[in-house]
Image: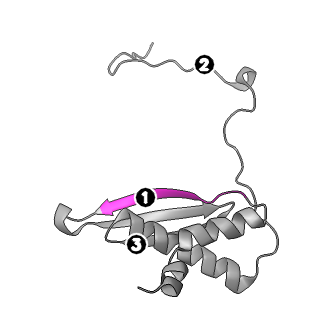
Amino acid sequence: MNAKSAANSNFVGKLQEVTMKRGWGEPEYETIAAEGPAHCRQFETKVTLGDRQFVGKGVNKKESKRKAAEAMLTSVEETGFSEPPKKKLALSPKTPADMKPVTFVPAGGLHSIS
């Protein structure tokens, strides 16, 4: 592999560079699936940037992450996104005062009152 093709295959780094340069923050990666026997496992990694998500598949986590980053980067470059992706809405309470207590009951511990 020559230096030019090596640079072009670092899609994870290139995506991070593009998103940081535009002030969008860092993409988030998550391995969402690992299927198949140990000797020929297939991985799926999801990359999320705001409200946009892409999935990459590969024979190892590194390859699936690279393919997810490549898909996101291709989308960003082809569509010319000039504005940041929409931020995900936070589903958690804003303050501890907004949190409601949770009680855990052991299995079989609840009885109906007649």
Identify the disc placed on residue 101: 2
Q: Amino acid at mark 2?
A: Pro
Q: Helix or strand or loop: what does disc 1 sit on?
A: strand
Compared with 9, 33 (above or below) is: above
Q: Which residue is mark 1?
A: 32
**Residue that appears at 53% across and 58% down:** 29
Q: Amino acid at mark 1?
A: Ile
Question: For residue 78, what is the image quadrant?
Answer: bottom right
Q: Is residue 40 visible?
A: yes
**Residue that appears at 25% across and 66% down:** 41
Q: Is residue 49 left or right of residue 94?
A: left
Cβ atoms under marks 3 and 2 closer than 8 Å: no
Q: CA distance from mark 2 to mark 1?
A: 30 Å
Say which of 56 and 1 sits in front. 1
Q: Position of residue 53 (x, y in %)?
A: 59, 66
Of the residues under marks 1 and 3, which one precedes in the sequence? Answer: 1
Q: CA distance from mark 1 to mark 3?
A: 10 Å
Instruction: Tell us which disc is closer to us: 3 or 2.
Output: 3
Colouring chosen for the image of the structure: one colour
Compared with 40, 89 (above or below) is: above
Q: Amino acid at mark 3?
A: Lys
The magenta span reads 25-34
Identify the disc placed on residue 91: none
Crowding at dot 3, Cα within 10 Å, few <14 / some 14-19 / many 20+, comes out as: many
Q: Specify the principal SS of the magenta part.
A: strand
Q: Position of residue 60 (x, y in %)?
A: 33, 66
Q: Which residue is mark 3?
A: 57
Find out whether residue 102 is within the magenta segment.
no
